[in-house]
Amino acid sequence: MSKVYDVVIIGGGPAGLSAGLYASRSRMSALIIEKAKWGGQAGTTEELENYPGSIEMPTGPKLMERMKSQAEAFGTEFVKDEVTGFDISDKIKKIISGSGKEISTRTIIIATGAQPVILGIPGEMELRGKGVSYCATCDADFFAELEVVVVGGGDAAVEEAIYLTKFAEKVTIVHRRDEFRAAKSIVEKAINNDKIDIMWDTVPEEIYGDGIVEGIKLRNVKTNEITDFRTDGVFMFVGTKPISEFVKGIVEMDPKGYIKADEEMRTSVEGIFAAGDVRIKSLRQVVTAAADGAIAAVNAEKYIEKNLEH
Amino acid sequence: MIELNKDNFDEEVLQATGPVLVDFWGEKCEPCKALMPDVHALAEKYGDKMKMCKLNTTQNRRLAIGQKVLGLPTFIVYKNGEKVKEISGAENCTMETVENLIKENI
Ligand SMILES: Cc1cc2nc3c(=O)[nH]c(=O)nc-3n(C[C@H](O)[C@H](O)[C@H](O)COP(=O)(O)OP(=O)(O)OC[C@H]3O[C@@H](n4cnc5c(N)ncnc54)[C@H](O)[C@@H]3O)c2cc1C
């Protein structure tokens, strides 16, 4: 018989890595499956200064590297693959992956996180990779001495705008409201930054350019006035959406696709847990993702003790 | 894989006959770096049917912008010096989509 894991964790972001660490420290056999990049969204931001203890080396990629090697040190296994579905008809559940493999496990932790929302305005898809970006660390280099627009008003938008000032000549934040949702300390930093301009009550209508971004049409939501704004790049940070399509119909979720889990990270299906950005919660951050992962792992262990051992 | 720069780009890509794949990546682009082992594996697998190249855009920014690339990861297939197909963005560039891009163009 092939190996049966105690827990298989889907997603290698902070929630998944923390679940792996806690599971392995309890001597459970644990496997993390990651389809793209270890560290998840947190691995794409240089400005990660609110994770407790990370002030000395506040970059996302470094923190995520340390999280991964910590889990590895306690015996967590890692594999690169995309999970496409489950078979949960038995007590021993099966995980089905894109490469056609089946993996058997006693419990599952869904930690698939979230991805950027695409607004869907004209030009946005067409000019992706040609000045329209969803990842500042990936693309900031291109905009040295150029001008960029950042769309959004949450933590990610304002933090990434500050990061972009290290490269771009000028950064204009376009936000649909008249104040930011981001933490006050970050907002102060942005407002005091000479390279940052802010346009309140403004939404993007269209991004245009011949092969590369040349400008953006902006609408003031109070006056409906349209401005034609010349820019070299547009960074979109208008929010994220959960990656949960592959478990639709299996576990309960809200209309947006966020998975319902209780305080112990238990979903509507016994033995399946959810952790991190993918679940319904009020604060989606690295610190809460890591906490969710720890709680999920401990409850996976409890579930096995209660239901699968005699 | 062939490492491209401003000195060999014309010769290796624009003047080449047959299809050429260029992986545009950057030193701070985590998704690009995570994908690199997969791209190397694909280069092994399809290297005899398509020329496989990579361009470090951090070191060759002007060259990349000249090809209208301002976002990573980006993969472009060239034939006879012309772009025939490209994909861009972390969610759109996976081992699977890059493999399809290669298969469709050999
Ligand atoms: C630009 C930006 C800046 C941010 N800045 C901060 C900050 O300063 N401080 C902070 O605390 N938080 C910040 N955040 C938020 C933080 O990154 C997230 O809250 C955190 O990463 C969520 O962790 P997670 O593990 O739940 O999900 P994610 O980090 O999204 O990881 C999920 C992982 O699952 C993988 N996956 C998805 N589907 C599958 C599948 N089917 N099979 C296999 N693998 C799959 C994904 O590839 C991904 O790697 C920022 C986010 C962004 C985008």
Image (tube, coloured by chain):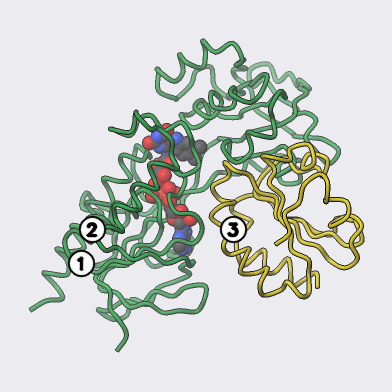
State left or right for residue A255 relative to residue B91. left
Residue that carries the numbered disc 2 in the rendered image: A297
Residue A243 seen in the current view: no
Could you say whether the residue bearing mark 2 is in a helix, strand or loop?
helix
Q: Position of residue A271 (x, y in %)?
A: 25, 67
Question: Three-letter amino acid code at disc 1?
Answer: Met
Q: Position of residue A295 (x, y in %)?
A: 22, 52
Above or below, comparing residue B35 to residue A54 in the picture: below
Residue that carries the numbered disc 1 in the rendered image: A28
Q: Decide which of A127, B70 is in the foreground and name it.
A: B70
Above or below, comparing residue A29 to residue A57 in the picture: below
**Residue beneath the point at 57% across and 41% down:** B28
Could you say whether the residue bearing mark 3 is in a helix, strand or loop?
helix
As measured in the structure, the alpha-carbon distance from the residue carrying label 1 to the one carrying label 2 is 9 Å
Q: Which chain is yellow?
A: B
Q: Residues within 10 Å of mark 1 (few under 14, many from 20)?
A: many
Which tag is nearer the camera, tag 3 or tag 2?
3
Q: Position of residue A177 (x, y in %)?
A: 54, 21
Q: Which chain is green?
A: A
Asked whether the beta carbons under mark 1 and mark 2 sit within 8 Å of each other, the answer is yes
What chain is tagged by disc 1? Answer: A
Residue that carries the numbered disc 3 in the rendered image: B36
Question: Three-letter amino acid code at disc 2?
Answer: Ala
**Residue beneath the point at 80% across and 42% down:** B68
Which tag is nearer the camera, tag 1 or tag 2?
1
